[in-house]
Image: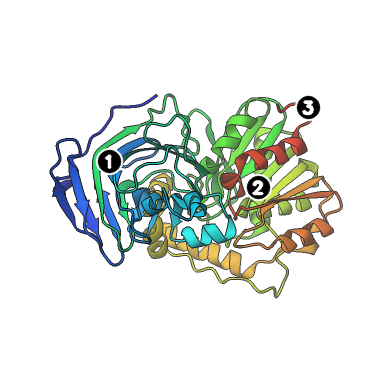
Amino acid sequence: MQAQTLRPDLRNPSIWTASGIHAEPLDDVKYPGIRFNETTQGGLYILNQPEFSEGSIEFDLRGRNQLQKSFVGLAFHIQNDSVYDAIYFRPFNFRPEDTSRQSRAVQYISSPKNHWFTLRTAFPGKYENKVQPVPDPDGWFHVRIEVAGQEVKVYVNNSEMPSLSVTKLSSTTSGRLGLWVGNQSDAGFANLEISPFKKMNAVPYGNNKDAGSYCQVGDARIYYEVYGQGSPIVLLHGGVYGYIDEFKPLIERLAAHFQVICIGTRGHGKSEMGRLPFTWAQRANDAYQVIRAVSNEKTTVIGFSDGAYTAYKLAALYPQAVNKIVAIGAGDFPKNSKREKFNYNPELLMRDAANFFKSRLALMPEPNRWDECLQGLNHLYNNETLSKETFQQITCPTLLVAGDQDQYHRPEDLVNVARYIPESQLCIINGCDHVVFYCNFPMFWESIRTFINSGKLP
């Protein structure tokens, strides 16, 4: 269901911010809008308000049929002028003499890490496609972009079939909208309409007063939420960017058959930070205390990144509480291994995703300690090790899941873990990076569904 449709005036400069480009009014009865002249670098024309999360964005667009001089489209979930997702078109590839170029007519990118060249090299044909029906490369054509959660679909000239359908590569869930123009391009935009999807009774995962509780563990209150009934399943989220809400698709599916216990890690969301240094053993103890506050049964534990390392330690230290583990995106970290040195800080994160982290800070009981928390995480990631000494203590069935393009862990790092854990299985999903369940949720879901099924999951 859609909320009220917005029709921002493209020719009113007071509601837009230009970044790298200059807009001129376009006085056309049918296409009242704006035109961007050719620039060396291209840029964005950003709508100041409101922010956009999910919905449908429609507009008319005109580029030109000149090779390598027409890259035009729309950016969404903009955090700043370099961090955003975008859909853009190459009109010179609509009807090229070299028909092989038709498959490169519409493109998805996720700036700054996943531009067209990176995506084409790593995932050929996945994030670009031909446009159907084929528009006039020198004329106006109509675009509808639908964003629903992590799914993005692009329709052209009112076609019932999308020309492009992709899963977002970024973890942002909202941000500003902006018209997007590439290098050496000029373009016309008109008739912009924004129809946000109305979220009916949306569950505020991570900030749900009806499902949330606290457990006092040593020097910190740990926040958790419980959904559904049945045998327990624990969800342990990732670090820095991570929190309970990143598991929304999992919670909704699992809660129909299990009791789902979602735990907020120290310093994340509504959980307190405490005063002691962060360690994997501390995180495991936090999780164990929350589990026992809710259930006396053995539980299946699903952990992502940070949460996966916590799951490993939990199974090693508290085998009486763990039935199975699903560890996502967490490889072998032995002592003296070469690894990227982490240096998270508020300035860096606010530059990359200001709106996202403002929403995170609004949940924190001690937002003034965010920098202290990040320094604690840096120390944890840069100095703590977790390898065979822990893995060899794990006796429960364990499923290791990762993308073959994971920027933090090579597939062989997962293979090493599998060798150390006697009852382990390994699932490497092709074409996916660290956040594998955002990249290819259907394949991810099928792999873990089979593992934890016990006859309960469809």
Q: Position of residue 287 (x, y in %)?
A: 65, 46
Dot placed on the residue nearer the N-terminal end, 1 or 3? 1
Q: Can see residue 435? A: yes
Which amino acid lies under the numbered mark 1 shown in the image of this protein?
Pro
Say which of 42 and 331 sits in front: 42
Q: Secondary structure at mark 3?
A: loop
Front disc: 3 or 2: 3
Look at the image and tell me in which quarter the N terminus lies: top left
State the mark number for residue 279.
Answer: none
Kindly check if marks 3 and 2 are in contact, taking CB atoms under 8 A apart as contact.
no
Q: Residues within 10 Å of mark 3 (few under 14, many from 20)?
A: few
Front disc: 1 or 2: 1
- Write the residue at 45% across / 50% down: 108
Say which of 136 and 431 sits in front: 136
Dot placed on the residue nearer the N-terminal end, 3 or 2? 2
State the mark number for residue 455.
Answer: 3
Q: Position of residue 58 (x, y in %)?
A: 32, 36
Kindly check if marks 1 and 3 are in contact, taking CB atoms under 8 A apart as contact.
no
The residues tagged by marks 3 and 2 sit, at their Cα atoms, a distance apart of 22 Å
The residues tagged by marks 1 and 3 sit, at their Cα atoms, a distance apart of 45 Å
**Residue receiving disc 1:** 50
- Write the residue at 42% across / 44% down: 363
Which amino acid lies under the numbered mark 3 shown in the image of this protein?
Gly
